[in-house]
Amino acid sequence: MNSPHIPIEWLYIGAAGEHYVMSECFRHNMEAFKLPIDRGFDLVVTHAYRHMRAQSTQASAEASPSVDMPFYMQVKSRQVVLTTPEKGDARPAWEGTFIIKTTDLELICRTPNAMLVCVLFIENRGEMLLSRTALAWWMSSAYVETLKRKKHFIPSNDGNCVELPVRYVEPAANTSYNQNPYVTLRRQNYSTDAKVGDLANGTLLDKGFFDLRLLGTPQSYAPS
């Protein structure tokens, strides 16, 4: 029986996000496995083949990665439609939240080789076609702990969940220079008269957060 508190489409988009992350891991020569029991983590990611090949051939060029493996991933997904400004130079954007259980957040923070992965499925509606773009970024346990300390996770009224506010702005089209995906993690406003849920600018993620080949490398917090 489905929970009356969870829209049915959220259940399927969650599975879609997990399979998208698994696909990206395969694409970057890693193994990814979906855990049969959901107790805070959804996926386990390894370099098992690379490790076994290095052990059997003694090939130093393929030595085991220096980062700690396996990785335990909590995957959160949203399917969104961008808001297109009626006029001006502003680009299409979306602003919303990713919801995570408080217990899952604590588990990620106290597990050094854990990470939180967010997936956005962006629906693009044109006159001639309907397409979807997937965008994912990963955040290490240490980085999630930093976000928690800087009040990025806003508690729900019942205290069972927290929300991570996110703003996505579509990169400019027809430009000659490289652009990062414009994802900003917003945070609770610190001003004295601010209420819970009042948001301030947070941090703009750099391109390394979107590259799963860099799993396990250090991430730095840069206020925007």
Image (tube, rainbow, N blue to C red):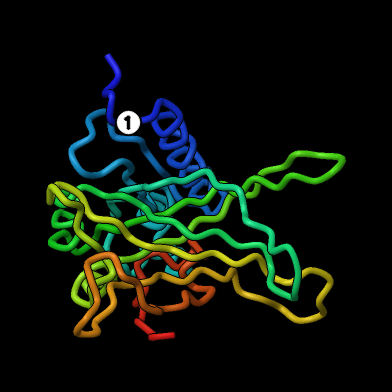
| Residue at screen point 15% across, 54% down | 107
Q: Give the residue at x 48% y 69%.
A: 61
Residue 78 x, y percent position in the rendering: 47, 46
Of all residues shown, which one is farthest toward the front?
Answer: 193
Vertical arrangement, residue 50 with respect to residue 185, above or below:
above
**Picture quadrant of residue 222:** bottom left
Whole-percent x and y of residue 21? 47, 47
Q: x, y (%) of residue 41?
A: 25, 44
Left or right for 5, reference 75: left
For residue 193, above or below residue 74: below
Q: Residue furthest right?
A: 128
Apparent side of residue 72 relative to residue 61 in the rendered image (left or right): left
Where, quadrant-wise, is the N terminus in this rendering?
top left
Left or right: 89 in relation to 49:
right
**Residue depicted at 57% across the width and 50% down the height:** 27
Say few, some or many: other residues with alpha carbon within 10 Å of mark 1 (under 14 / 14 to 19 / 20 or more). Answer: few
Tally of numbered tags? 1
Work out whether residue 127 or residue 223 is closer to the camera in this orientation and state it.
127
Q: Closest to the observer: 112 or 124?
A: 124
The one of 207 and 170 positioned closer to us in this rendering: 170
Judging by the rendered image, the residue that carries numbered circle 1 is: 6
Q: Position of residue 111 (x, y in %)?
A: 16, 59
Under tag 1, what secondary structure? loop
